[in-house]
Image: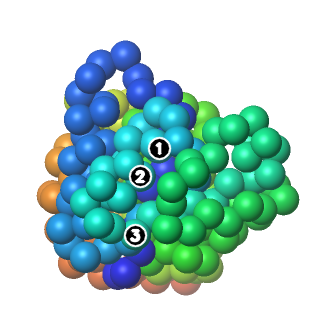
């Protein structure tokens, strides 16, 4: 891996533990020699991760749609800032530039971005590692939902296993570095058996 894509909130969240985790993630990325790819914002957890990476001498590449740049949300001091036409273009370029994906706490956008690259992996469009940084149990309910999808036969156990998780940045990066891609020939069978 050379570049890690981090999806996270444009808000800092209610608990200071989220900002602390964003700072720790930025530091871990730089200490391991990775570059950051992210949504290009200067606000919230997004801005904190990027600021930490830049302050530590790392590389931060932002990808932001033009309508958000106009609203002055774009980070002005990144290594590179790609301004794209749409949210779809943003996700496609972030995926192309990245060798792995991490979702930190965030809202709808964070969940949507992570679940899209997760789906792309299920469909065989990439084999890059994907992880949830489960700060303060933020993603416990989502992980329970993924487990329920296996129990109720909407998801194969092998595909559930592609979602890596940890509550500390270094532990998550360790798992991503040792990730072995999983290939499933068919994710749903006609007889409703997974």
Disc number at residue 46? 1
Q: Residues within 10 Å of mark 3 (few under 14, many from 20)?
A: many
Q: Residues within 10 Å of mark 2 (few under 14, many from 20)?
A: many
Q: Name the quadrant containing residue 124.
A: bottom right
Query: Image point 18% across, 68% down: which residue?
Result: 31
Relative horizontal placement of residue 92, taking residue 97 as reference (left or right): right
Which numbered disc flags the more N-terminal residue, 3 or 2? 2
Q: Name the quadrant containing residue 93.
A: bottom right
Q: Mark 1 touching mark 2, by CB under 8 A? A: yes
- At numbered mark 3, what does the secondary structure look like: helix, strand or loop? loop
Q: Which residue is mark 2?
A: 50
- At numbered mark 2, what does the secondary structure look like: helix, strand or loop? helix
Query: Image point 38% across, 49% down: which residue?
Result: 51
Q: Which residue is mark 3?
A: 59
Spatial CA span between label 3 and label 2: 9 Å
Whether residue 162 is situated above or below residue 34 in the rendered picture: above
Instruction: Please provide percent x and percent y for residue 57.
Output: 29, 66
Query: Image point 32% across, 74% down: which residue?
Result: 34
Relative horizontal placement of residue 130, taking residue 31 as reference (left or right): right
Instruction: Please provide percent x and percent y for residue 61.
Output: 52, 66
- At numbered mark 1, what does the secondary structure look like: helix, strand or loop? helix
Instruction: Please provide percent x and percent y for residue 37.
Output: 49, 64
């Amino acid at each position: 891996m050379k570049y890690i894509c981090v999806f996270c909130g444009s808000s800092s969240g209610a608990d200071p533990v989220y900002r602390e985790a964003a700072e720790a993630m930025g530091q871990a990325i730089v200490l391991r020699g990775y570059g950051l790819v992210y949504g290009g914002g200067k606000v919230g957890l997004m801005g904190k991760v990027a600021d930490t990476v830049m302050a530590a001498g790392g590389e931060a590449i932002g990808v932001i749609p033009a309508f958000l740049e106009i609203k002055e949300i774009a980070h002005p001091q990144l290594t590179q800032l790609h301004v794209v036409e749409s949210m779809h273009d943003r996700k496609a370029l972030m995926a192309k530039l990245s060798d792995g994906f991490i979702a930190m706490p965030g809202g709808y956008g964070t969940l949507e971005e992570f679940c899209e690259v997760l789906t792309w992996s299920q469909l065989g469009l990439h084999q890059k590692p994907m992880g949830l940084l489960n700060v303060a149990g933020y993603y416990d309910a989502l992980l329970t939902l993924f487990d329920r999808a296996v129990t109720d036969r909407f998801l194969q156990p092998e595909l559930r296993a592609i979602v890596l998780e940890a509550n500390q940045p270094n532990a998550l990066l360790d798992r991503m570095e040792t990730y072995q891609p999983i290939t499933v020939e068919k994710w749903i069978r006609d007889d409703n058996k997974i």
